[in-house]
Image (tube, helix red, strand yellow):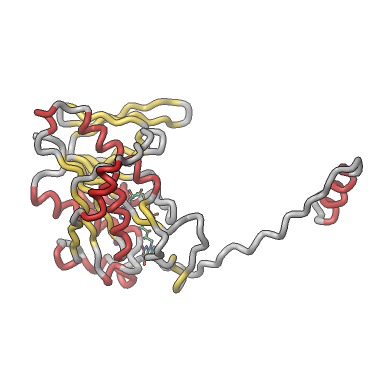
């Protein structure tokens, strides 16, 4: 009967390049955006869960990569294909712009329910954070929307007998938690080391079809989504001021004095 797994995969702007802001919000759709690096871990874990099954157990299994974002977010799905996803689903709609966490979660949960129309979904896997927003709340909100249990911060994951079991390190203690399927599991970046995609998958990912759903195709409370539905407001977002240039002193025996003078000049000693 297999496992049907939806992996939440967010497209994020390149965190190493300078971000631009429009109306206090990060300008999405930058050409150099990519799959959130932390979402490679749930994808890898989904692939490993299926690899650990016998051919018979695996029959009917599917890994669905799901993203909500602007047109460029399909790049995240192409990467997910390289890493082993079977199906890529993109929720794309102009009305989504400005959605806050609750709106994002409502849409992702509606898309999971839509995926489940083709057969029950056993697991939703997510990363521990999106490297742009760093909210770490979306998986919990998706679980609440679906009415499913959630296991967080998983450092190990096993599925057997209709239940998911995770290990998580918390404050010097390793907890073992279990919940019946279907369940939402957010995994940390220690759970695995994502593999380097093989050439065949890289080539296949270029042309593989992506399923696109608009809001109208999902059973979602549209009053929650978009800027109008957002219950939080970004009041301002200012780029951090440039750091002053580095001052380099060569130590010719006067290093200690130069250092003390430097600290004193800034009122630090
Ligand atoms: C008022 C307001 C307006 C906003 N406007 C916009 C906007 O116009 N456009 C915009 O893109 N963002 C917007 N945001 C930010 C947006 O709400 C968050 O980026 C989004 O909710 C995800 O939160 P996060 O990045 O902190 O994810 P986290 O909670 O840190 O993500 C954890 C995990 O959840 C999954 N996940 C999170 N988001 C997605 C996603 N979109 N698709 C698939 N999986 C996901 C991933 O697995 C990820 O690893 C806005 C936020 C606020 C408060």
Which residue is nearer to you in this view: 74 or 180?
74
2 sits to left or right of 173:
left
Residue 161: x, y in percent? 15, 27
Report the residue at 23% width, 61% height from top.
Answer: 91
Q: Quadrant of residue 164?
A: top left
Residue 143: x, y in percent? 25, 47
Q: Quadrant of residue 158?
A: top left
Which residue is nearer to you in this view: 76 or 176?
76
194 sits to left or right of 249:
left
Quadrant location of the N terminus? Answer: top left
Residue 190: x, y in percent? 41, 34
On screen, residue 97 above or below 243: below
Report the residue at 84% width, 56% height from top.
Answer: 265
One can see residue 144 in this view: no
Residue 266: x, y in percent? 80, 56
- Quarter of the image where ligand 1 sits: bottom left
Q: Quadrant of residue 106?
A: bottom left
Report the residue at 31% width, 50% height from top.
Answer: 79
């Amino acid at each position: 009967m297999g496992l049907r797994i939806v992996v939440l995969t967010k497209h994020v702007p390149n965190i190493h390049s300078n971000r631009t802001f429009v109306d206090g919000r990060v300008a999405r759709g930058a050409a150099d955006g990519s799959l959130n690096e932390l979402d490679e871990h749930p994808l890898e874990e989904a692939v490993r869960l299926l690899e650990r099954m016998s051919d018979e157990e695996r029959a009917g299994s599917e890994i669905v990569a799901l993203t909500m974002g602007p047109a460029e977010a399909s790049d995240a799905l192409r990467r997910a294909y390289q890493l082993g996803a079977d199906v890529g689903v993109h929720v794309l709609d102009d009305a989504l712009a400005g959605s806050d966490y609750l709106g994002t979660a409502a849409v992702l949960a509606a898309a999971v329910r839509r995926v489940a129309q083709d057969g029950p979904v056993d697991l939703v896997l997510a990363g521990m954070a999106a490297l742009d927003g760093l909210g770490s709340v979306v998986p919990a909100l998706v679980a609440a929307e679906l009415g499913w249990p959630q296991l967080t911060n998983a450092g190990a994951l096993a599925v057997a007998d209709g239940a998911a079991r995770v290990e998580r390190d918390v404050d010097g203690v390793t907890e073992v938690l279990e919940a019946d399927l279907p369940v939402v599991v957010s995994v940390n970046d220690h759970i695995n080391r994502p593999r380097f995609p093989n050439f065949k998958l890289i080539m296949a990912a270029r042309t593989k079809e992506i399923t696109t759903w608009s809001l109208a195709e999902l059973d979602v409370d549209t009053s929650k989504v978009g800027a109008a539905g957002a219950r939080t407001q970004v009041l301002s977002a200012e780029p951090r001021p440039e750091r002053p240039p580095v001052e380099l002193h060569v130590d010719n025996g006067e290093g200690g004095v130069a250092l003390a003078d430097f600290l004193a000049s800034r009122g630090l000693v």
